[in-house]
Image (cartoon, rainbow, N blue to C red):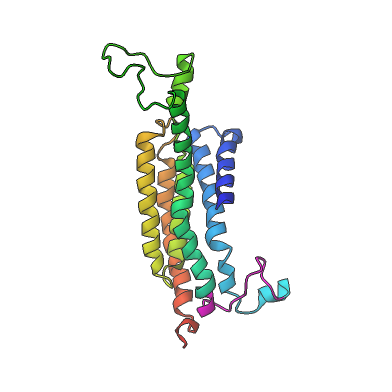
Amino acid sequence: MLINEAIAIFFIFMTPYKKRHLVGVEQSLCFMEIFLMELSNMGLVVLYNGFDYFGLIKLLFGGSSIMSIELYKGFENRWYSNIGQAICFSVFSMSFSKNLIDVSFYVKDAFKRFHDRGFKFYKKKDPNDDDDDSVNTRKKTMEDLINLYTGKEFEGEKNYGRMISTMFVILLYSTGMPILYAVGAFFFFITLFINKILLLKYYRRSTRLNTKIAERAVMMMKYAILLHILVGFAMLTNPMPFQT
C-alpha cells in the first residue's frame, strides 16, 4: 500500500513534464495511470490464480506462480479462504492506510503552524485586545506567513484513481464474496468523511481540477459492470465452492 502511494505521488510529480497542451488532459492521463496501477496491484495480479484450468501456469513456471502463491483450478474453496480473504482485508485496510497518509500531511502542517505561534492556540498576539490585529507569528514576511497557512492543492487524480480502482475490485469479486459490499461501503464512508474534513480545513482551492476526471470515471463504470458479470459468471458456474 505504501508502494502504491509512492508510485501515485511519482505519477503526479511527473504530470507537468508530459507536456500536454491542456491541464485536464494531463490530469486525466495521470488518473488513468494511478487507476491501472492500483487495480493491477490490488485486484488483477491475483486473478490469474483462479483460472489455471489447463495447468498453463504450472507448466510455464514449474509448479509455482509468479508471486509464489498456491495455484487454484478456478474459484474453489481454498481460493476464497486465501486469496479472497486477502482481497477483503486489503480493501478494509485501505480505509485507514490511504486516508491516514492524507491526514498525516494535515497534522504535519498544523504542527508547523502551532510551532510558529510559539505553541499557542490563538493567532493574534493579544487575543484580548480587539483593536490589535498583529499576527502571532515568527515569520518575517507576509509571503512566508501565507505559504505557512496555505494547504496543499487537492490531488483529484490520485483520489479518483484510488476510489475507482477500489470500486472495480469490489465489483470484480463481490458476486462470490458479498461481504465486499459492506467492506466497500465502509471504505467509501471513511474516504468521504476524511476528504470532506480536509477540503474544508486544509486543502487550498484547486486551480487545476475540472470535470474531465469525473466524466472519465463515470464512463469507466460500464466496464466495471461488464467485468462484474464476467467474473461473477465464472464464480457461480464453478461447482467447487458448493461441494462439501
**What residue lies at 49% left-to-right and 80% top-to-bottom?**
238
What is the residue that sits farthest to the bottom in this orientation? Answer: 244
Q: Quadrant of residue 121?
A: top left
Would residue 226 be visible to someone looking at this image?
A: no
* Residue in front for this viewpoint, 160 or 68: 68
**Outermost left residue:** 130
- Counting from the top left corner in percent of width and height, residue 19 is at 59, 33
Q: Position of residue 75 (x, y in %)?
A: 51, 76
The residue shown at (39%, 68%) is 179
Q: Is residue 143 above or below residue 4?
A: above
Q: Find residue 191 and report its horizontal and vertical position in percent.
A: 39, 49
Residue 78 is inside the magenta segment: yes
Q: Main secondary structure of the magenta part?
A: loop
Measured along the vertical axis of the image, is residue 234 above or below residue 31? below
Residue at (40% x, 62% y) in the render: 183
| Closer-to-camera residue (235/65) | 65
Q: Which residues are magenta?
A: 63-79
Magenta stretch holds residue 76: yes
Task: Report the label total.
Answer: 0
Which residue is at a point 44% across and 78% down the rendered structure image? 236
Whether residue 91 can be seen here: yes
